[in-house]
Amino acid sequence: MSKILITGGAGFIGYFLIKSLLKQNNQIVILDNLYRGRADDEFNEILKNKNVTFHQVDLADIDALKTCCLEMDAVVHCAALSSPWGKPEDFKASNIIGTEHILSASQQAGVKRFVHISTPSLYFDFKSQTAIKESDKLPLIFCNEYARTKAEAEQRVLNSALDTIILRPRGIFGPQDRAIVPRLLRFIKNKKLFLPSSRNPLVDLTY
């Protein structure tokens, strides 16, 4: 049995990660600043599991992060401000400074493995691209503050002394999806689907 801390555990990725890890009989500590009686029966059932502990903690609370990271075998950092637009200072606070805080807390606690959830959006260079490799250069100008701050957060992770791994899922959908499939259903209902160009765009999706 491993002890695993998940930031952003009340989110879409975190929720399904928790379900998967519980099947392997792990102990889970969930950190999230958004959960306030989430109207989700399945999630509330997860919180009743004896192997699950929930802390409503913000990534700005360094002392709380240090306490929560104690005795953890691994940290999975899912929490982020994910939006195509917003205030630069908000993206910096959440995606860069928040990542710095959880990295520092993990290192001080002696965490063995740190998994950082990032995005392939940081490769977007205002042109069509396929078969992008990890060795490909990042654009000189990022498409938005989300991509820019996630790229900077990745550098913080790579430069840390922890044993780290970075994952970049794209276009996540599935049960309880509140973004991609609901939009498609709305387009179908209205009999209008707006495409970004007259060509046939290819987009990666992750179930």
Image (cartoon, helix red, strand yellow):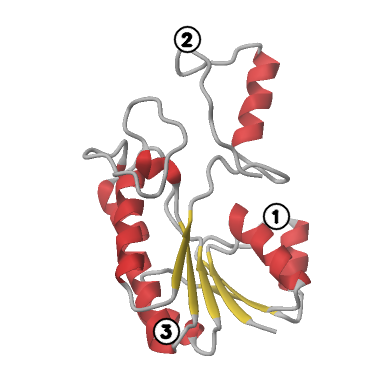
Q: Which residue is mark 3?
A: 66
Q: Quadrant of residue 92?
A: bottom left
Residue type, mark 1 in image = Ala
Residue type, mark 2 in image = Ser
Q: Nearer the viewer, mark 3 or mark 1?
A: 3
Mark 1 vs 2, N-terminal side: 1
Q: Which residue is mark 2?
A: 198
Circle number at residue 6: none
Q: Give the residue displayed 37% in from the left and 66% down from the top.
A: 99
> Pointers 3 and 1 in contact (CB under 8 A)?
no
Front in this rendered view, residue 68 or 37: 68
187 sits to left or right of 119: right
Q: Nearer the viewer, mark 2 or mark 3?
A: 2
Mark 2 vs 3, N-terminal side: 3
Front in this rendered view, residue 44 or 116: 116
Instruction: Reply above or below: 85 against 66.
Output: above
| Image quarter hosting the N terminus | bottom right
Q: Which residue is mark 1?
A: 39
176 sits to left or right of 5: right
198 sits to left or right of 47: left
Residue type, mark 3 in image = Lys
**Secondary structure beneath label 1:** loop
Q: Quadrant of residue 59?
A: bottom left
**Secondary structure beneath label 2:** loop
The residue carrying pointer 3 sits among few (fewer than 14), some (14 to 19) or many (20 or more) residues within 10 Å by Cα, namely some
